[in-house]
């Protein structure tokens, strides 16, 4: 998929998130992508409503 010439993506980020997504079935791919993008850009904590995401990572704060 990522080898296609017309797809422009951060391949390292995508591969990292894909391997996490396989392990963490309760968390969406998009949420994992947002979290890892925030980490790469030193923009943590990530604030979310997703309690499952907060359970797997300390760089997440849940809004109440």
Image (spheres, rainbow, N blue to C red):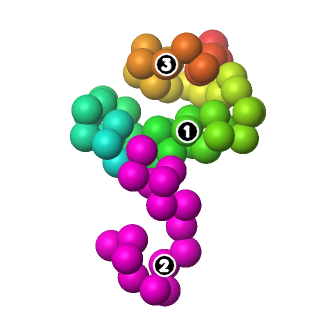
Which residue position holds label 2?
7
At 33% across and 73% down in the image, what residue appears?
A: 1
Asked whether residue 32 appears in the rendered view, the answer is: yes
In this picture, which residue range is highlighted in magenta? 1-17
Give the distance between the C-alpha atoms of the residues marked 1 and 3, in whole angstroms: 10 Å
Name the image quarter holding the C terminus: top right
* For residue 23, side relative to residue 43 (left or right): left
Q: Earlier in the sequence, mark 2 or mark 3?
A: 2
Which type of secondary structure does the marked residue at label 2 adopt? Answer: loop
Disc 1 residue crowd, few under 14, some 14–19, many 20+, Cα 10 Å: many
Q: Position of residue 30 (x, y in %)?
A: 47, 47
Q: Position of residue 29 (x, y in %)?
A: 40, 45
**22 lies above or below 3:** above
At 37% across and 77% down in the image, what residue appears?
A: 3
* For residue 9, side relative to residue 21 (left or right): right
* For residue 35, side relative to residue 24 (left or right): right
């Amino acid at each position: 998929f990522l080898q296609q010439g017309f797809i422009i993506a951060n391949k390292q980020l995508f591969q990292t998130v894909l391997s996490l997504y396989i392990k963490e079935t309760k968390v969406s791919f998009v949420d994992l992508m947002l979290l890892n993008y925030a980490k790469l850009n030193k923009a943590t904590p990530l604030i979310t409503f997703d309690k499952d995401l907060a359970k797997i990572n300390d760089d997440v704060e849940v809004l109440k």
